[in-house]
Image (cartoon, helix red, strand yellow):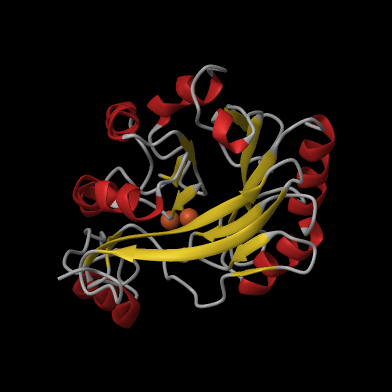
Amino acid sequence: MAFLGDLNGAPGRRTLMAHLDELRHDHEPDLIIANAENLRNGSGLSPDLYHAIRRLGIDAVTLGDHVYRDRRIVPFLEDPSEPICRPANLSAHAPGKRCIRVPLPKVCGGGDLLVFSLLGRVYMGLPANDPFAVADELLAANPSVAGTLVDVHMEATAEKAATAFHLDGRVSTVLGTHTHVPTADARVLPGGTAFQTDVGMCGPYASIIGRDPDAVLRHMRTAVHTPYEMGSGDERLCGALVILRPGSSTASSITPFQYGGNAPSSKK
Ligand SMILES: [Fe+2]
Ligand SMILES: [Fe+2]
């Protein structure tokens, strides 16, 4: 199973079109799941873009703090047949499904992969409920799944690691998003859960986490509100491949990948 970090604007979509075939060739993932919270010019997801990435072969979609920036996505979040969910630990009144179940191919033993994202509560703008308790509740409500992917959409590395250790041995993988920078700590935890603090965004790395450096610097140095434009250049597809251990809700390996731009593994 492959998971792609925050798809970021037009460059993020370009990386999908340019490198998905290479990813399929190299790793033969049975499922490809992506966080798409930044696909609409860096903020939110429109129905058109949702359809576009589904057509490219993305099997399921998670979101983060930008979930409602384009409210036209709400009917898709509420539709039980659409494989897209809002962060699970928002208010009970927030619209949309908290999790989705994605059928695994027979070669992986069949059954469903439970997928959900959790927002952090440290240095995050959107009020969120206790991610540990919400994860426990969703696992208790879905006892018969073949595996679970948890997207930890959090700013603080310690909060991501704490969530991973809390769920170790009970979910297949805990994969970080939101900070848009791939971390060098991919590993299988003692209980068998595959974890990486951040799998990295799919977007332009010649930028400040996806945004045009000039605009971000102007804002940070003067404090005057400045609209952020998308950055460009060094466009990479980033994520991790997780091999699930059939019937155990854990994983046997995690392999981060990067394609395109100046990625260390990219084929020139
Ligand atoms: Fe993001
Ligand atoms: Fe985010």
User: Is 220 rendered above or below residue 180?
Assistant: below
Count how many numbered circles sit on residues in the image: 0
Q: Position of residue 192 (x, y in %)?
A: 74, 60
User: Is 26 rendered above or below residue 80?
Assistant: below
Choose between 105 and 80: the one closer to the eye: 105
Choose between 90 and 98: the one closer to the eye: 98
Residue 182: name its quadrant. Answer: bottom left
Left or right, residue 115 beside residue 218: right
- Most distant residue in the bottom direction: 221
Q: Position of residue 37 (x, y in %)?
A: 42, 46
Q: Residue at x 49, y 64 (%)?
A: 255
Q: Position of residue 25 (x, y in %)?
A: 31, 50
User: Which quarter shows the C terminus?
Assistant: bottom left
Q: Position of residue 56 (x, y in %)?
A: 28, 35
Residue 61 at least partly seen: yes
Q: Residue at x 25, y 59 (%)?
A: 227
Left or right, residue 192 beside residue 257: right
Q: Residue at x 74, y 67 (%)?
A: 162
Q: Residue at x 64, y 30 (%)?
A: 112
Residue 104 at least partly seen: no
Residue 197: name its quadrant. Answer: bottom right
